[in-house]
Amino acid sequence: MPIQIIAPAPFLSAEEEEEEFQVEEDEGGVPLDLDNDGDTAMDGVAASKRKQGRQAAGIVTPGEIVTDDPQWMRGHGTYLSSPTADGESQSIVSSLAGTISKTNKLLSIRALRFRYVPEIGDLVVGRILEVQTKRWRVDIAAPHSAALLLSSINLPGGILRKRTSTDELQIRTFFSEGDLLVAEVQTLNSDGQASLHTRSLKYGKLRNGYFMTIDAGMVRRMKSHVLTMNTSNGGGEVDIYLGVNGYIYIAKHTTPLTEGGVESKSVSITRLEEEASEAIYSNVNEDISPETRAEIARIGCVLRALVKANVKIDEEMLNLGYEAALEEFLEGFDWGSDTEAGKRVVDLALAKRRMG
Amino acid sequence: MPPPTPLSPPELSYLFTSLSLTPPIRPDLRSASQFRPLIAECSFLPHCNGSSRICMTEAGECIVGIKAEVEKDATSKYATIIEREKWIEVSVEVAGGGASGPGSGVGVGGISGAGGASGRDEGDGGAAVWLKEGLLACGGDGWSILDRLVISKGWHWKLYIDVLLLTPTSHPSPLLLSTAVNMALDSTYLPKLTSPHDVDDIPAFSDDWAISVPLYEPTTFPRPPISLPVVAIGDNVFLDPSVAEVATAEVGLVVTLALSDADGSCDIVGVRGMEVGRAGGKEGDRKGINRKLLRKMVTTCVNEASEVIKTLGETTHKQMFRA
Amino acid sequence: MAAKAPDRRRNNPPSHGTNPPVFLSTSLPSSTIKPEQASRPPNEIRKIFLRTGLVSSVTGSSFLEIAPLKLSVSVLGPRPLPRTSTTPFAAQAILTTEVKFAPFASTVRRGYLRDSSERDLGSRLYQSLVGAIRRELYPKSRIEVVVTILDSEDEGDEVNTVYMEEGKAAFEPTFRDAGRAERALGVVLAGCITAASAALADAGIEMYDLVSGGVSTVLVDQFDGKGKGKEGDSEKRLYVRDPAIAPPEGKKPLATCVLGYMAARDEISELWILGKLGTKNGTAEMEELVDEAIAAARSSRGVLNEAAKERVQFIVDKAQSTTQTDDTEMTG
């Protein structure tokens, strides 16, 4: 069958939806008893959920009163209604269509789909949009493109080298239009524009792999967004850069220069500098075996399948998904032609997670 | 002008090597001749004679509406081919005015002729050109779609085929556009003529849709054409290439085919070059198609085409309002 | 391009003025220019007149004439990209192609704005040339190829009309030539490709290979009966290189192939097939048609090579003669 044509169908049936919410239930906030009449008109399933105290899945729309209980603090996606004349307490009103999430006493609304909002310290994967005289404009899927200053990158020939006018003239030899890089959000200016830096050897230009994008909200914030996975089928180690902004890069694992640096530091501090200068801005890939390429593609497919099933991505989920994909693969299924393959993998992965 | 390549050199080189391996490794693990699944729906716009909606995950979504209007022949005595070809009007519109941000990189129209060259500023008028071209060429011995549009003496249907691309920044794959048009045409019905055929009075039609006439008879041939994009990287030939694959490809073709008989054999009704990135190769590499590669590319299309057209046709008929 | 105001700043004429070139060879008595010979064998292409250096104010130019088709090509550049904020960085030269019929180039007058068929021709010319040019040698610059068609074989004449008096002309078995307009455009495109290559060579732009255009058509015998002998018609196929627009008597065109061909590399840079080709024998029918078009392109390549050499030879000769005089002056 060379082509598969699927008849249009609603996104999720009611039962599936419930299941998803169970999966999505998170961060263990206190159950919120919303008992005022002004709130969500829930029916059937949702109402029973309320009784069970699973309020995390409550969906609100802009303008809807979330609560008038003064014990809650308003967070993102909410505002305080104007004070009433008779001096009653103000209510917290939603300004987004999304789900309610609570962190201790903080109430916030998370939209289902949104653009990435950069925060200081985020690890992002970006693509150079434009080269300017002393900086680059980087696409990080945020409302504003981010800036990467020439002074915030590692210059070849030593981390502590001073930037010179020669570097300005050669700015394209570091990053050119279309280049991919992994960086950290260093500062945010008043209008939300991010400034990046790559002043660490774990950041910098991306090579030896495959780039893909997913919705920004689908990547869960984790301790580390650079995962190294030991793949099967002779694929060796594969690095996955899960940008908080939803840009993902999957590449063959290369010994990070920092590690190499640690070893060579004992020999000479200048060794590290030399190493950095040679490799850091190269556009040439290493030799990557077909096995590694196949595993990189498989990880990509797992990520896509997880996103399609609305499962947030974190290290655990990715590992489980990959395991599931391998098991399915042994049963001889084919990602390319089987549209249900992704779903089966996700189901299997979720089952594994429930089992612990 | 080709779109400025949105991929970085290491990315392109990675893709190029992966795709030129034997067997190739496509980023989504498809086999070389496997199409991406698509969601198809037809005959859902009540104001149209025929309509379709096609949704492909990466390539985006588009809606086609076909409207037929009664029109008097432009000349009473002679109607030149040029005049008759105006009976079909194809337009491709991008929802939101075709806004393509600086990051999108890829413009509208992957086919040469589809707004390439300096014509890019004219939007996607080119896509309309090749869609119509395939439609008119798809015919054969004394048969042409235009003949089906003759109502009576001095009157004909004017067919407006309006393609609306709903995802502005995505790369409209020729497959997306052509499957959508194919399905819409296949679901197009025209009201039945009730007035005599050979009188040049204003024609009258039955308002009963149950007896309306299909534009393409479901059981006769040829069926509406379909255009399959095919690219080559190294010795490998890929059907339905993704955006990244097009950017990496060395050469590309769009082969338009139509089912010619019930056995499922196809006729080639058109071949066009496709604008590809040519970004993966190195200097002095392949700059065009040699004959061996041409045979391989077209054969791949021909082998898969009948299955694709049949599957598409079945889906259409399953969803038809009369079914 | 047409919609915007022309960029007048960069097309300044040379300060010293230009001399109109005079082609002596064409100023023959009109009686010697015969109309299109009907007796031309199917495997022979029409005679091509191709000269470079027609327009001295541009980098490179050429003029091509094939029977009724007359067109001139100007190549501008490589020149810098306009410095605007929207212009992206270009690591390779940006090629733009533009094909325009002069308003008087066909029986039906054409407007000054480019219509869809002209845009289509432009982008296909782009496709056929872009692979051949070594664009990576010209970063941050653009090369413009502008083709003006001065005269062309007509698309819509008497033969091409459908007699509609009976009101049901479409059901009559009268022969109708559906691909005619496309075939006419195909012949024009092939001419554009050949002429544009000559102009690019004249402009001194580095290329991997010269691209020459070729056209071929496959014809079958026209049956007067309705659809009889449908299966038998495959035996009597006639392949014609560089076809005339009007098909020969009693023949009906099935499909036309236009291609841009790089003879030295044996690669097709642009392919355009229109018509109906069966696939019962795989792609054999298509391949035969393509091979004919390649043969036509090879023939025009010969002319192209000569044209490219001609002017170089002329300049070299001239330079030699002047240096010789210089030498004699110095020695003397």
Image: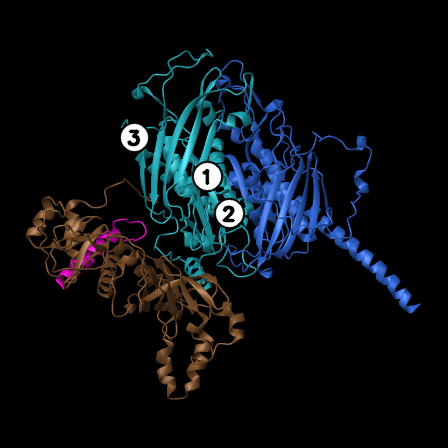
Chain colours: A brown, B cyan, C blue
- The amino acid on which the numbered mark 1 sits, given as a three-letter code, is Thr
The answer for which chain carries disc 1 is: B
| Side (left or right) of C128 relative to C23 | left
Residue A247 seen in this snapshot: yes
Residue C290, percent across and down?
A: 56, 42
Q: Are marks 3 and 2 in contact (CB under 8 Å)?
A: no
Which is nearer the eye, C320 or A173? A173
**Mark 2, mark 1: which one is toward the viewer?**
1
Q: CA distance from mark 3 to mark 2?
A: 37 Å
For mark 1, does the 10 Å Cα neighbourhood hold few (<14), some (14 to 19), or many (20 or more) residues? many
**Could you say which is closer to the camera, residue C156 or residue B267?**
C156
Neighbours of disc 3 within 10 Å: few (<14), some (14-19), many (20+)? some
- Above/below status of C35 relative to C193: above
Q: Chain of mark 3?
A: B
Image marks 3 and 1: residues in contact by CB distance under 8 Å:
no
Residue at disc 2, secondary structure: helix
Q: Is residue A239 magenta?
A: no
Q: Main secondary structure of the magenta part?
A: helix
Q: Is residue A58 above or below residue C328?
A: above
Residue B280 lies, in percent from the top left, at 48, 59
Image quarter hosting the C terminus of chain B: top left
User: Start and end of the magenta stretch?
Assistant: A333-356
Q: Which residue is mark 1?
A: B256
State the mark number for residue B320: 3
Local SS, label 1:
strand
- The residue to which callout 2 is attached is B294
Under mark 3, the amino acid is Met
* Label 3 vs 1, first from the N-terminus: 1
